[in-house]
Image (tube, rainbow, N blue to C red):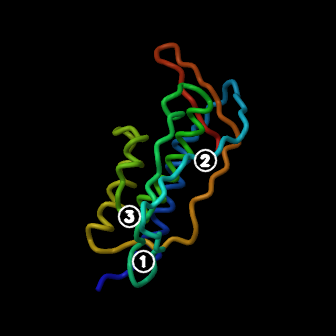
Amino acid sequence: MTTPLKKRSVIKIASLAIGLALVLSGCSASQADEIPNDPSPSIEAAETKEYVAASPNGPAQNVPKPVLPEAVHDNSAAGARATVEYFWQAVDYGRLTGDTEPIEQVTHYVCEACNQLIYKWEQIYADGAWAVLDGETSIQIGEVQQNFDEDSDEAWTAVL
């Protein structure tokens, strides 16, 4: 029988996730583009199976997979906001299932913190362990900033 993820490992992963939030949030201050809170990205409903939360006895089952919203493809404040919101839903999904593909959809391969997060969750589940979460990740986006770089396209920064 396998056992749930140890608290220390969860703390390490949570610390990595916080570090990732700081990487994603950036620290440059340019034009701020405030937009109203959009609804969170949708999550596919489980077809016929009911969601079963993880417990010390076993991993979560029938976890709804987050759906990548169309807005993430927009080079806009709304696109940046949708990407950050989807990222954290994908992280929760990865923590509950070990399936990190949704995280990979919105991260860049050169992001070392992202790669570590993805690798750790894949390894945890490959080793027969799982996570028992205490609620979903909750984020609050204060503003979305548009930053210009002469040598590249526009970039967006979400301030959490």
The amino acid pointed to by label 3 is Thr
Pair 1/2: label in front: 2
The amino acid pointed to by label 2 is Ser
The amino acid pointed to by label 1 is Lys
Seen in the picture, residue 16 relative to 10 is either above or below; the reply is above
Q: Marks 1 and 2, Cα distance to the nearest angstrom?
A: 30 Å
The percent position of residue 150, horizontal first and vertical second, equals 52, 13
Q: Secondary structure at mark 1?
A: loop
* Relative to 106, 155 lies left or right: right
Q: Secondary structure at mark 2?
A: loop
Q: Marks 3 and 1, Cα distance to the nearest angstrom?
A: 16 Å
Give the mark, 3 or 1, whose residue is nearer the N terminus. 1
Which residue sits furthest left?
Answer: 126
Which residue sits furthest front?
Answer: 48
Is residue 115 or residue 2 the one in the foreground? 2
Query: What residue is drawn where x is 57% and y is 59%?
Result: 137
Whether label 1 touches label 2, CB < 8 Å: no
How packed mark 1 is, by other alpha carbons closer than 10 Å (few <14, some 14-19, many 20 or more), is: few
Question: Which residue is denoted by mark 3 in the rendering?
Answer: 97
Give the mark, 2 or 3, whose residue is nearer the N terminus. 2
Question: Which residue is denoted by mark 2 in the rendering?
Answer: 40
Q: Secondary structure at mark 3?
A: helix
Is residue 31 or residue 98 the one in the foreground? 98
Q: Where on the picture, by quarter, is residue 112?
A: top left
From the image, which quarter does the N terminus lie in?
Answer: bottom left
The percent position of residue 154, horizontal first and vertical second, equals 53, 21
Question: Which residue is denoted by mark 1 in the rendering?
Answer: 6
Q: Marks 2 and 3, Cα distance to the nearest angstrom?
A: 20 Å
